[in-house]
Amino acid sequence: MTTILLQAGGGSLFTNGFFMIAMLAVLIFFMIIPQRKKAREQKEFMEGLEKGQQVVTASGILGSIDKIEDRIVTLNVGNKTYIRVTKNAISKELTDAIFTTKADKE
């Protein structure tokens, strides 16, 4: 019997380098750029908060803004009940999901 030995193709340095660069480009295009865009939108949202605006915190608490003091926001959650949260706790995604959906239905 004869045995045939197959040698795995090592590929050239150019081919290996090309695939590494392609994988890096895919990583940047699909992960890093969208994450930066999302962070920028959240920052703009936090800077644009105003008294009376309906918001949702990251933990799901709904309320309207009663007072904004630097990085602390006081929310009126109903019946003169107030809670204080940081601006970072207010979620653009959840606020858009809850309040734009209600506006669309009306």
Image (cartoon, rainbow, N blue to C red):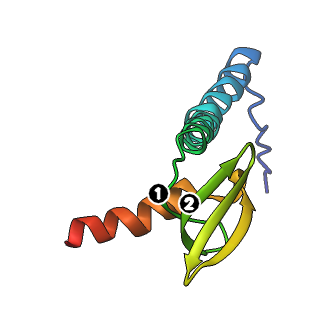
Q: Residue furthest bottom?
A: 79
Please rate how many residues cluster around mark 1, counting C-alpha atoms within 10 Å: few if below 14, some from 14 to 19, many from 20: few
Image point (75%, 46%), residue name: 71
Q: CA distance from mark 2 to mark 1?
A: 6 Å
x then y, percent, for residue 45: 54, 43
Q: Residue furthest left?
A: 106
Image point (47%, 58%), residue name: 52
Could you tell me the amino acid type at mark 2? Ile
| Residue 102 shown left or right of residue 2 in the figure | left
Q: Is residue 34 above or below residue 54?
A: above
Could you tell me the amino acid type at mark 1? Gln
> Does dot 1 land on a helix, a strand or a loop?
loop
| Residue 72 shown left or right of residue 65 in the figure | right
Image point (32%, 68%), residue name: 101
Please rate how many residues cluster around mark 2, counting C-alpha atoms within 10 Å: few if below 14, some from 14 to 19, many from 20: many
Which residue matches tag 2? 65
Image point (80%, 44%), residue name: 5
Image quarter of residue 24: top right
Which residue matches tag 1? 53
x then y, percent, for residue 66: 58, 60
Q: Nearer the viewer, residue 33 or 73?
A: 73
Q: Nearer the viewer, residue 28 or 89?
A: 89
Looking at the figure, which quarter contains the C terminus? bottom left
- Look at the numbered discs 2 and 1 and tell me whether their residues touch, using CB distance below 8 Å: yes
x then y, percent, for residue 96: 43, 59
First along the sequence among labels 2 and 1? 1
x then y, percent, for residue 77: 58, 76
